[in-house]
Image (tube, coloured by chain):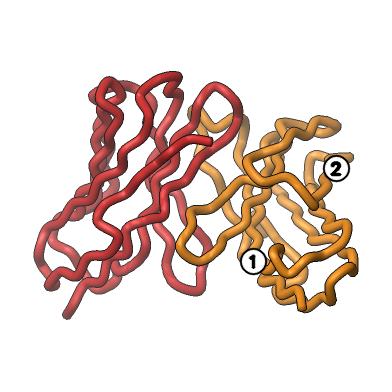
Amino acid sequence: NAGVTQTPKFQVLKTGQSMTLQCAQDMNHEYMSWYRQDPGMGLRLIHYSVGAGITDQGEVPNGYNVSRSTTEDFPLRLLSAAPSQTSVYFCASSYRGLSDNEQFFGPGTRLTVL
Amino acid sequence: ILNVEQSPQSLHVQEGDSTNFTCSFPSSNFYALHWYRWETAKSPEALFVMTLNGDEKKKGRISATLNTKEGYSYLYIKGSQPEDSATYLCASKTGANNLFFGTGTRLTVIP
C-alpha cells in the first residue's frame, strides 16, 4: 500500500492563480480531510468528506473547494490564491469516522503564494 | 471552533528520564481524543484514539490516560530515548466529524 499520497510536494503561485492539490489513498478509507499547518497554530481542518459524493466544511474553508468523485481521490482547489494561503497542506484519511479510527497523513504540500 | 490546549509548549529531558504532558479540551459534547506523534520533516503518525472516561492505552514506553468529565488527557513516556524527540499533538472530536488540534508539545531528549 502506498498509503496517502499528495502531489506536488512544493508549489509557488502568484496571487490570483488557481491550482489543485492532489490527494489519493489506496486503503479504501471512507473519511478524507484536508488540513493546513501554520507556524504557532495547530493543524486546522479545511474540508472533509465522509464518502464519495459527500463533502463538508471544516474550520477554515474560505478560498478552497473540494470534491469527492471516487473513494480514492480528494483534490483541494485554490480558486484564486492569496498570500494568506501560504502554508503546508496535509491530506489525511481514516477508515470511517474519527470516533474510533486514527487518521493517516500524507507527506504534505508546501505552498507559497507571492 | 474547539479550544484544545497543550502544555508545556516545549520540553527538554535527559535520556532515560520519564516525562508527561497534558492536553485539555472542552468536556461537553465529547466524542474522542486523538494523540499523534510528529517528527520533523515527516507527517503526523497516530498513537492513540481514546473515547471512554478512564481509558488508558499503551504502546511500548508511551501511554495515555483520559478524563472526559474534567476534559484532560495525559501522555506519558517512560525512559525517554533520543528517538522520542518529536512534537506530540492531541486533537478532540465533537459531534460533527471535525477534529480540533492543539498546537503540540515539542519534546527534545538529550543523549
Q: Residue at x 62, y 45 (%)?
A: A45
Image-based side of B77 in relation to B84, left or right = left
The location of residue B25, given as percent across then percent down, is 36, 34
Report the front residue among A90 and A40.
Answer: A40
The amino acid pointed to by label 1 is Ser
Element class at badge 1: strand
Residues tagged by mark 2 and mark 1 found on one chain of the structure: yes
Question: Which residue matches tag 2?
Answer: A67
- Residue type highlighted by circle 2: Ser
Write down the chain letter for disc 2: A
Colour of the chain lettered B: red
Give me the chain letter of mark 1.
A
Decide which of tag 2 and tag 1 comes sooner along the chain.
2
Foreground: disc 2 or disc 1: 1
What shade has chain A been given? Answer: orange
Residue named by callout 1 = A87
Q: How many marks?
A: 2
